[in-house]
């Protein structure tokens, strides 16, 4: 059924399908039964610089004190239109990672940008469900194994993430 793309159960609502397959708590996933992942989309410095002008402070401690002074000075008179050529590749990477981690921390504190996953074994196949978790812990949208097969799960490859349990 899953591999042949015969969507025999597609007309069943995602929560009803989850219930029939024994997926626990699909409307309000719990820590013990689901893997939760908070995420923040990574941005380039150019994207971030369009909205925020101060961010060099994020690499303080990652570079020497002298280099940090240089970067702080260069960034004061800098606009994102000028480019970021004054940064080394490593400094650029560190800044983009620090920005993503700050965004992730904010998302966690505000209870946003969270997905949860549950997997069951059925007929030698793993059936995966993905729940978009709202700030109150409820499932805002439940994706089914059909959605997984069709590539509709959230792509976390370009995100900073933190998972639990």
Image (tube, rainbow, N blue to C red):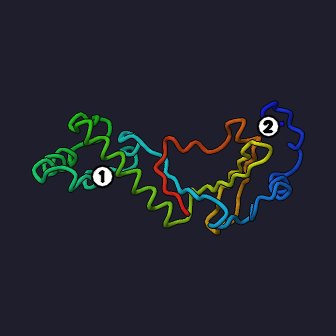
Residue furthest left as drawn: 66
Residue 41: x and y, percent?
49, 47
Quarter in which the N terminus is drawn:
top right
Residue 72: x and y, percent?
18, 50
Residue 160: x and y, percent?
46, 50
- Above or below, comparing residue 4 to residue 110 in the picture: above
- Above or below, comparing residue 56 to residue 29 in the picture: above
Q: Which residue is mark 1?
A: 55
Picture residue at 70% right of the left edge, 58% below the top: 140
Determine whether, in the image, residue 49 is placed left or right of residue 106.
left
Residue furthest front as drawn: 124
Q: Secondary structure at mark 2?
A: loop
Residue furthest top as drawn: 4
Distance between the alpha carbons at the discs numbered 2 and 1:
47 Å
Q: Which label belongs to residue 2?
A: 2
Q: Which is in the foreground here, disc 2 or disc 1?
A: 2
- Above or below, comparing residue 143 to residue 2 in the picture: below
Q: Which label belongs to residue 91?
A: none
Picture residue at 68% right of the left edge, 55% below the top: 118
Picture residue at 75% right of the left edge, 44% below the top: 145
Residue 61 position by quadrant? bottom left
Q: Residues within 10 Å of mark 2 (few under 14, many from 20)?
A: some
Tally of numbered discs: 2
Residue 114: x and y, percent?
58, 57
């Amino acid at each position: 059924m899953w591999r042949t793309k015969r969507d025999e159960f597609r007309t069943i609502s995602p929560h009803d399908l989850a219930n029939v397959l024994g997926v626990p708590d699909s409307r309000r996933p719990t820590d013990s039964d689901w893997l939760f992942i908070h995420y923040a989309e990574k941005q380039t410095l150019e994207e971030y610089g369009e909205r925020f002008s101060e961010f060099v402070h994020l690499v303080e401690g990652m570079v020497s004190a002298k280099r940090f002074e240089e970067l702080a000075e260069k960034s004061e008179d800098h606009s994102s239109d000028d480019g970021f050529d004054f940064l080394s590749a490593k400094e650029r990477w560190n800044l983009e990672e620090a920005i993503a981690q700050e965004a992730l921390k904010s998302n966690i504190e505000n209870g946003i940008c969270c997905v949860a996953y549950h997997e069951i074994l059925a007929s030698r196949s793993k059936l995966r469900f993905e729940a978009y978790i709202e700030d109150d812990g409820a499932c805002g949208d439940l994706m089914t194994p059909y959605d997984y097969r069709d590539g509709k799960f959230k792509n976390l490859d370009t995100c900073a993430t933190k998972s639990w349990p």
